[in-house]
Amino acid sequence: MAPTATEPGESATSTDSTNEPTPRDAEVEQSIAATADPTPVEQEPTPLTSELIAARAYELFVERGGMHGNDLDDWLRAEQQLGGSEVEAERLTRALNDRPAN
């Protein structure tokens, strides 16, 4: 790799032998700060799906030691933990219960 040109009094590395920031480091930080968007990007919440609830309910099942018989409790707790609205949770629960059994 070819050496890069430096300004007089600057070393080719970003820090000197005492690990103190060089003038170049300050320039880079100022450039980053000037181009950074100060407003956070708000993301849409992930829609609550039966797959997400089922995955969390399974995690709860495993955390309980895999004891069967508490599937509804695990499902309801998963809905609550995932922060879904009551209306959405009710809709998904009804959709799941309306599916034909295999």
Image (cartoon, helix red, strand yellow):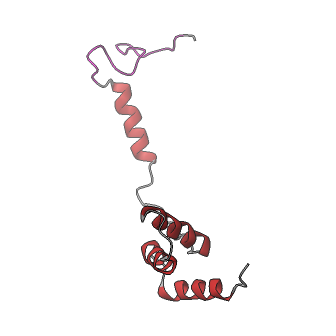
Quadrant of the rendering where the N terminus is positioned: top right
Give the percent coordinates (x, y) of residue 83. 45, 76
Instruction: Give the residue at x 48% y 64%.
Output: 66
| Horizontal arrangement in the rendering, residue 64 relative to residue 52 (left or right) | left
Q: Quadrant of residue 23?
A: top left
Instruction: Give the residue at x 39% y 22%.
Output: 14
Q: Residue furthest top?
A: 2
Give the percent coordinates (x, y) of residue 70. 47, 77
Would you say residue 42 is visible in this rendering?
A: no
Quadrant of the rendering where the C terminus is positioned: bottom right
Camera-nearest residue between 100 and 32: 100
Residue numbers of the magenta segment? 3-20
Rendered position, 9 above or below 56: above
Instruction: Give the residue at x 59% y 83%.
Output: 92
Would you say residue 17 is visible in this rendering?
A: yes
Q: Which is the main secondary structure of the residues drawn in magenta?
A: loop
| Residue 52 falls inside the magenta stretch | no
| Residue 14 falls inside the magenta stretch | yes
Q: Quadrant of residue 24?
A: top left
Camera-nearest residue between 3 and 34: 3
Give the percent coordinates (x, y) of residue 95. 65, 86
